Image (cartoon, rainbow, N blue to C red):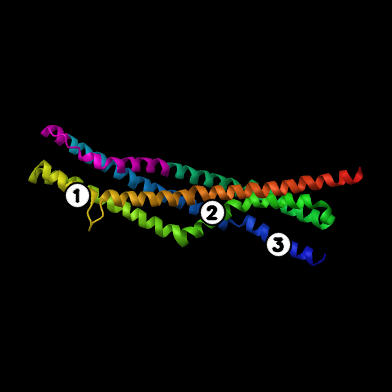
Amino acid sequence: MNTQHLAAGVLLLLAVTLNWMPDLDLAAETYLSAAMTDNLIIYATARTLNGLISVIQSIQLSISVGAGMGVNLGEILDPLNDLIERFSSFVLYALAGLGLQKLVLIATSSLVMKVVTTMALLTGFIVWVLFGTARHWAVRLSVLVILVRFFFVIEVGTISVLDKLYFDHQKEQAHTALEIARDQLSDLRTSYMNAVTEGGFFSGSWNVASSLIGDDNQQGVTDLAAGAIVELIVIMLVRGMLLPLLFVWLLIRCGQVLLRSTALESKIPVAVTE
């Protein structure tokens, strides 16, 4: 056995060890579960905002009708309410994407896949040692099996690193802004009724409108919530959809290259014989 065979044997031993090591798969699955929990918390916050806006709009409408007025303060909240409803649907799609990734990860880390990967590694190594470059197709098929086995673990690990470097901080800030907007709307609902009762309908409506829109010295609730929602959409789009799709595309491309090389190699002996 030469130096190349020895080095390949060490790599084989390392790959088999990683294949049966549960820590990598468990860490990836734990990350996806935590990401799904975070998205559920954000979804709950968004739905709470949606409910508070609906309550404020309904309160205003009943007072307006009772007083015989045509003022509709709730129109100020309509764009934000529509944005929150669309954002809630987007979060559900992101949750479905995370669930699909978790399902694929469980499949690629199953006992059957580990056995198949081990057999592919051993077969590829034995064929390469016995036949050398004459049977590269077996090595390429082994590499393809290894890619399928570890690709999604690598994908989740890459996204996890990006989370720690950038996404987690930005997501936490945006979620905090959403919670602040939620608390402000909750206080606004109470103060609105008190202002109407104490100062009259027009005075109460003016105070609420100022709080919603904001002024030069204070950011309004609508501006705060809308900015946080847009930032969360960008983070979820990149982290939960674009990056996983990029990794799937890379896996497909790698598979196509390996299979094409194998197909071309299998035709060479026939051409030489003829």
- Badge number at residue 156: 2
Q: Nearer the viewer, residue 170 or 148?
A: 170
Identity, as a three-letter code, of the amino acid under mark 3: Leu
Placement of 62 over or under 47, stated as above or below: above
Q: Can you tell which mark lies on residue 11?
A: 3
Front in this rendered view, residue 171 or 124: 171
Q: In the displayed structure, does residue 196 sit left or right of residue 159?
A: left
| Residue type of the residue flagged with mark 1 | Ser
| Majority SS type along the magenta span | helix
Which mark is drawn over residue 210?
1
- Which image quarter is the C terminus in? top right
- Asked if residue 71 lies in the magenta stretch, the reply is yes
Work out whether mark 3 precedes mark 1 in sequence or the reverse, and give the earlier one.
Answer: 3
Label 2: how many residues lie within 10 Å, few (<14), some (14-19) or many (20+)? many
**Above or below for 29 versus 196:** below
Which secondary structure lies at badge 3? helix
| Residue numbers of the magenta segment | 62-91
Q: Which mark, by number, is residue 137?
A: none
Kind of residue indicated by mark 2: Val
Asked if residue 232 lies in the magenta stretch, the reply is no
**Earlier along the polypeptide chain: callout 2 or callout 3?**
3
Disc 1: CA contacts within 10 A as few (<14), some (14-19) or many (>=20): few
Compared with 4, 31 (above or below) is: above
In front of the other: label 2 or label 3? 2
